[in-house]
Protein backbone atom coordinates (compact mmCIF):
# COMPACT_ATOMS: atom_id res chain seq x y z
CA UNK A 1 0.00 0.00 0.00
CA UNK A 2 1.38 3.40 -0.91
CA UNK A 3 0.61 6.88 0.39
CA UNK A 4 -1.64 7.54 -2.61
CA UNK A 5 -3.78 4.54 -1.58
CA UNK A 6 -4.52 6.00 1.86
CA UNK A 7 -8.12 7.08 1.63
CA UNK A 8 -10.86 6.53 4.21
CA UNK A 9 -12.60 4.00 1.92
CA UNK A 10 -9.39 2.04 1.27
CA UNK A 11 -8.54 1.96 4.98
CA UNK A 12 -12.08 0.79 5.78
CA UNK A 13 -11.81 -2.06 3.26
CA UNK A 14 -8.40 -3.05 4.64
CA UNK A 15 -9.72 -3.01 8.20
CA UNK A 16 -12.71 -5.18 7.24
CA UNK A 17 -10.42 -7.65 5.48
CA UNK A 18 -8.09 -7.86 8.48
CA UNK A 19 -10.99 -8.37 10.90
CA UNK A 20 -12.34 -11.19 8.69
CA UNK A 21 -8.88 -12.78 8.56
CA UNK A 22 -8.55 -12.55 12.33
CA UNK A 23 -11.92 -14.24 12.82
CA UNK A 24 -10.90 -17.02 10.42
CA UNK A 25 -7.65 -17.56 12.33
CA UNK A 26 -9.59 -17.78 15.63
CA UNK A 27 -12.01 -20.34 14.15
CA UNK A 28 -9.20 -22.47 12.73
CA UNK A 29 -7.28 -22.34 16.03
CA UNK A 30 -10.38 -23.40 17.96
CA UNK A 31 -10.99 -26.31 15.57
CA UNK A 32 -7.35 -27.37 15.72
CA UNK A 33 -7.31 -27.37 19.51
CA UNK A 34 -10.61 -29.25 19.60
CA UNK A 35 -9.46 -32.03 17.24
CA UNK A 36 -5.83 -32.39 18.25
CA UNK A 37 -5.72 -32.46 22.05
CA UNK A 38 -3.24 -35.37 22.16
CA UNK A 39 -0.38 -33.72 20.32
CA UNK A 40 0.88 -31.63 23.20
CA UNK A 41 0.09 -31.08 26.82
CA UNK A 42 1.58 -27.58 26.89
CA UNK A 43 -0.14 -24.49 25.44
CA UNK A 44 0.90 -23.44 21.94
CA UNK A 45 3.78 -20.96 21.75
CA UNK A 46 3.80 -17.85 19.61
CA UNK A 47 7.06 -16.21 18.54
CA UNK A 48 6.96 -12.43 18.79
CA UNK A 49 10.10 -10.41 17.98
CA UNK A 50 12.38 -13.39 18.58
CA UNK A 51 10.94 -14.39 21.99
CA UNK A 52 8.49 -17.22 22.57
CA UNK A 53 5.38 -16.51 24.61
CA UNK A 54 2.22 -18.53 25.30
CA UNK A 55 -0.52 -17.91 22.75
CA UNK A 56 -3.40 -15.80 24.02
CA UNK A 57 -6.41 -17.87 24.93
CA UNK A 58 -9.72 -17.22 23.27
CA UNK A 59 -12.78 -16.58 25.44
CA UNK A 60 -14.77 -19.17 23.48
CA UNK A 61 -12.35 -22.00 24.37
CA UNK A 62 -13.58 -24.67 26.80
CA UNK A 63 -11.59 -25.06 30.04
CA UNK A 64 -8.58 -27.34 29.98
CA UNK A 65 -9.27 -31.01 30.83
CA UNK A 66 -8.78 -31.96 34.48
CA UNK A 67 -6.47 -34.92 33.86
CA UNK A 68 -3.13 -34.36 32.12
CA UNK A 69 -2.85 -35.90 28.68
CA UNK A 70 -0.16 -38.34 27.70
CA UNK A 71 2.50 -37.26 25.23
CA UNK A 72 1.89 -38.64 21.74
CA UNK A 73 5.01 -40.84 21.88
CA UNK A 74 3.73 -42.55 25.04
CA UNK A 75 0.42 -43.24 23.32
CA UNK A 76 2.28 -44.78 20.38
CA UNK A 77 4.36 -46.94 22.74
CA UNK A 78 1.22 -48.15 24.54
CA UNK A 79 -0.32 -49.10 21.19
CA UNK A 80 2.93 -50.80 20.17
CA UNK A 81 2.94 -53.02 23.26
CA UNK A 82 -0.64 -54.11 22.53
CA UNK A 83 0.19 -55.32 19.01
CA UNK A 84 0.16 -59.10 18.32
CA UNK A 85 3.33 -60.99 19.21
CA UNK A 86 3.42 -62.79 15.86
CA UNK A 87 3.93 -59.56 13.92
CA UNK A 88 1.91 -56.66 12.64
CA UNK A 89 1.70 -54.48 9.56
CA UNK A 90 1.85 -50.66 9.73
CA UNK A 91 -1.88 -50.49 8.83
CA UNK A 92 -2.74 -52.56 11.92
CA UNK A 93 -0.63 -50.21 14.03
CA UNK A 94 -2.49 -47.22 12.55
CA UNK A 95 -5.83 -48.83 13.47
CA UNK A 96 -4.63 -49.43 17.04
CA UNK A 97 -3.64 -45.75 17.32
CA UNK A 98 -7.04 -44.74 15.94
CA UNK A 99 -8.82 -46.80 18.60
CA UNK A 100 -7.03 -44.81 21.30
CA UNK A 101 -6.91 -41.31 19.80
CA UNK A 102 -9.91 -41.37 17.42
CA UNK A 103 -7.60 -39.82 14.85
CA UNK A 104 -5.76 -41.68 12.07
CA UNK A 105 -2.04 -40.81 12.10
CA UNK A 106 -0.17 -39.89 8.94
CA UNK A 107 1.75 -42.67 7.22
CA UNK A 108 4.95 -40.70 7.70
CA UNK A 109 4.29 -40.43 11.46
CA UNK A 110 3.94 -44.20 11.79
CA UNK A 111 6.93 -44.89 9.54
CA UNK A 112 9.13 -42.43 11.45
CA UNK A 113 8.05 -43.89 14.80
CA UNK A 114 8.70 -47.48 13.64
CA UNK A 115 12.14 -46.57 12.22
CA UNK A 116 13.07 -44.82 15.48
CA UNK A 117 11.80 -47.81 17.49
CA UNK A 118 13.91 -50.16 15.33
CA UNK A 119 17.03 -48.07 16.01
CA UNK A 120 16.23 -48.14 19.75
CA UNK A 121 15.67 -51.91 19.70
CA UNK A 122 11.98 -51.71 20.63
CA UNK A 123 10.83 -53.18 17.31
CA UNK A 124 12.34 -55.73 14.93
CA UNK A 125 11.35 -56.63 11.39
CA UNK A 126 9.60 -60.00 11.64
CA UNK A 127 9.21 -60.47 7.88
CA UNK A 128 10.72 -58.19 5.23
CA UNK A 129 8.25 -57.72 2.39
CA UNK A 130 8.26 -55.33 -0.53
CA UNK A 131 5.20 -53.73 -1.98
CA UNK A 132 2.26 -51.74 -0.79
CA UNK A 133 1.55 -53.71 2.39
CA UNK A 134 5.10 -53.38 3.69
CA UNK A 135 7.03 -55.48 6.15
CA UNK A 136 5.73 -57.17 9.26
CA UNK A 137 7.12 -55.83 12.53
CA UNK A 138 7.34 -57.36 16.00
CA UNK A 139 7.54 -55.50 19.31
CA UNK A 140 10.38 -56.49 21.64
CA UNK A 141 9.09 -54.57 24.67
CA UNK A 142 7.85 -56.62 27.63
CA UNK A 143 4.12 -57.25 27.65
CA UNK A 144 2.04 -55.90 30.54
CA UNK A 145 1.22 -58.51 33.18
CA UNK A 146 -2.30 -59.91 32.83
CA UNK A 147 -4.75 -58.96 35.54
CA UNK A 148 -4.76 -61.44 38.41
CA UNK A 149 -7.90 -63.39 39.18
CA UNK A 150 -9.64 -62.40 42.42
CA UNK A 151 -8.82 -64.57 45.47
CA UNK A 152 -11.20 -67.40 46.29
CA UNK A 153 -14.03 -66.34 48.55
CA UNK A 154 -14.63 -67.98 51.94
CA UNK A 155 -18.24 -68.63 50.91
CA UNK A 156 -17.16 -70.97 48.11
CA UNK A 157 -14.58 -73.66 48.87
CA UNK A 158 -11.77 -74.05 46.41
CA UNK A 159 -12.26 -76.86 43.93
CA UNK A 160 -9.25 -79.09 43.51
CA UNK A 161 -8.31 -80.71 40.24
CA UNK A 162 -7.73 -84.09 41.90
CA UNK A 163 -10.66 -86.48 42.10
CA UNK A 164 -12.01 -87.15 45.57
CA UNK A 165 -11.31 -90.60 46.97
CA UNK A 166 -14.11 -93.03 46.31
CA UNK A 167 -16.00 -94.36 49.31
CA UNK A 168 -15.95 -98.11 49.72
CA UNK A 169 -18.67 -99.93 51.58
Image (cartoon, grey):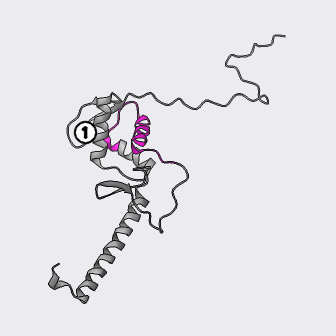
The residue closer to the viewer here, 23 or 84, is 23
Identify the residue at image location x=28%, y=41%. 111
For disc 1, the neighbor class at 10 Å (few under 14, some 14 to 19, many from 20) is few
Q: x and y percent of residue 94 in the render?
A: 35, 45
Magenta residue span: 68-92
| Residue underneath mark 1 | 134
Please say whether residue 124 is visible from this viewpoint.
no
Residue under the point 20% across and 40% down: 131
The quarter of the picture where residue 31 lies is bottom left
Residue 35 on the magenta segment: no
Residue 29: image quadrant is bottom left
- Rendered position, 10 above or below 41: below
Residue 125 placement (x, y as % from top left): 29, 30
Along the viewing direction, whichever of 106 and 34 lies nearer the viewer: 34
* Residue 106 visible here: yes
Tell me the quadrant of the picture where the C terminus can be found.
top right
Q: Where is residue 60 in the image (x, y as percent from the top left)?
A: 47, 69
Q: Nearer the viewer, residue 147 or 162?
A: 147
> Is 58 placed left or right of 23 in the picture?
right
Q: Is mark 1 on a helix, strand or loop?
A: loop
Residue drawn at point x = 81 percent, y = 10 percent: 168
Residue 97 versus residue 125 in the image, above or below: below
Amino acid sequence: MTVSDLSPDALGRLEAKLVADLEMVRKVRALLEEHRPLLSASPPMVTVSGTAAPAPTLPSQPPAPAEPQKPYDEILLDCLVQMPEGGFAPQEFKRAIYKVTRNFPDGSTVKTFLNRAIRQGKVVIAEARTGRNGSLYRCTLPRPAPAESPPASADFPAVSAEPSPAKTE
